[in-house]
Image: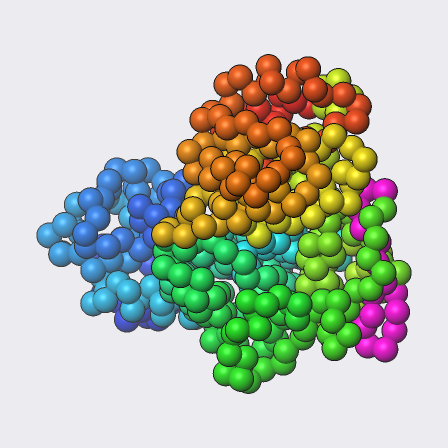
Amino acid sequence: MQSLLVKDIRKLLEGKLISGSEQWYVNHAIYYKRHDLTKHNTLIFVSKADTVNWHEIDRLGPSLVITNMATSELQKAKANTTVVKVTSLIQAYWTFIQYYRELFHIPIAAITGTCGKTTTKDMIKHMMEQDRNVQASVSSKNEPRQSLPYLTGIDEKTDAAVFELGLGNTGNIKHQCMIYQPTIGIITNIGVHHLDGCKSLEGYIKAKAEIIDGIKQDGTLIINMDDENTKKIPLHLFKGKIIHFGTNKNSDIRASHIAFANGGMRFRLHFSSRIYHAFVPGYGEHQVYNALAALAAVHEMGMDIGKAILRLRTFKNMERHLEFSEGIAGSTIIDDTWTNNPTSVEAALNVLDSIGKDKKVIVILGDINRLGNFEKKYHRDIGSMVAERQIHTLITIGKKAEEIAKQAIQDGAKANIHMFQDVSGIKELLDPILDNQSIVLIKGPMSSRSMIEFASNLKVK
């Protein structure tokens, strides 16, 4: 965070100094109870509804408390704490965010989508960070409450930023865009997820579309031209620049001749009347789409596309993202336990279609959460996907995932099908059938520690 003088913050927020010194500098900012207080010189927004541990705040002082609490409560503050009282904490919070964001005139990309957000974000960061200082969200930690620390992670040394937008409910993306005020917005794709919070697919698409209003004026929107649900977004409302990526010949940045290669995907990149030979680590056509979105973004941020393609070759995928490992008895284990939704399951099955030919394909699928009233429908859809493929064994784990197995049976799947409530007993089932011709896909929610550990135990250490 760029250092700010407490006195200047008080004036900005039109607050009243209740106690403490204002002749020192703030280096961090948090919202009390939403973020951990771990550092000295921290600005802390405190709601009047909070129960405050004044000893904790003072111990990590000097601390600056911005609050709308009653003066009687504020008199409990200790000597190492500066207290500024404001009329409206919400107004003070947003005034501070607006002020801080406007200190920096740098490209900021914000990414949403059902799948590929983290990978695309990490690709952008990887390609840029060799010669630029890039602030980025961490891993898949994209909850709206993380936005304030991520924003204040930008300082005078930052050249660019890229943030992943989390979506649990309608309004989440709007809220995060109000904080980040991105100059570039990216929608990787729109599948099916979070229907419990968004009520329906239409509501989910609308929630994703909130990014359009969130991009700064004259900004850029990068979208997947091949994605059917993305086409349902009312783009006429967006007044900035639109870049389409995909395999469609009308795409602004396009991939053709996509093929599996050693360790990843090779393809031809068509951009600005030129053709480049490109390679992206990681298997699956979806990985090429992630690369296209990332390449479009870094070019918008001022990077030469040829240089970006070269750097893309050295990208390292996150663990448990279709991660290939040697398994017991010479088998191949594909660990895809990072996230689980219908779109990512279909992408994983598509990868198996290519690399699983003439192999003994074993698919282990866990519950898909957050589908609301459409839970059975989408699990059954996956069962139908499995039934139409050449799969040796299907194993489901969990009550919800049973619908996958039941539908596969109903559709006449030739696979051996087994239903389990947990991982107990699955290893014993697999031991006799695993060999060097076996490919095992394990896909489950990141909340299932047991599935993650099970996948790990199948790998040769």
Most foreground residue, 305 or 293 = 293
Q: Is residue 398 above or below residue 103?
A: above
Q: Residue furthest left?
A: 72
Q: Is residue 28 visible?
A: no
Seen in the image, is 226 located left or right of residue 213? right
User: Looking at the picture, how far across and down is residue 227, in whole percent?
Assistant: 62, 66
Using the rendered view, name the quadrant where residue 275 is placed. Answer: bottom right
Q: Is the stretch drawn in magenta largely helix, strand or loop?
A: strand
Question: Exactly how many numbered labels are in the figure?
Answer: 0
Residue at point 20%, 44% (across, down): 51
> Viewer-proximal residue, 46 or 249?
249
Which residue shows up at 37% across the image and 43% down it?
A: 37
Front position in the image: 61 or 133: 133
Image vertical order of residue 332 relative to residue 236, above or below: above
Q: Is 131 left, or right, of 321 in this rendering? A: right
Q: Residue 177 in magenta?
A: no
**x and y, in percent, of residue 300 in the image:** 70, 71
Q: Which residues are magenta?
A: 262-276
Rendering coords of residue 111 (x, y %): 57, 61
Residue located 83% across and 70% down the image: 270
Q: Residue at 41% across / 55% down in the picture?
A: 195
The quarter of the picture where residue 12 lies is bottom left
Q: Which quarter of the figure is the C terminus placed in?
A: top right
Q: Is residue 49 visible?
A: yes
Q: Position of residue 403 (x, y in %)?
A: 47, 39
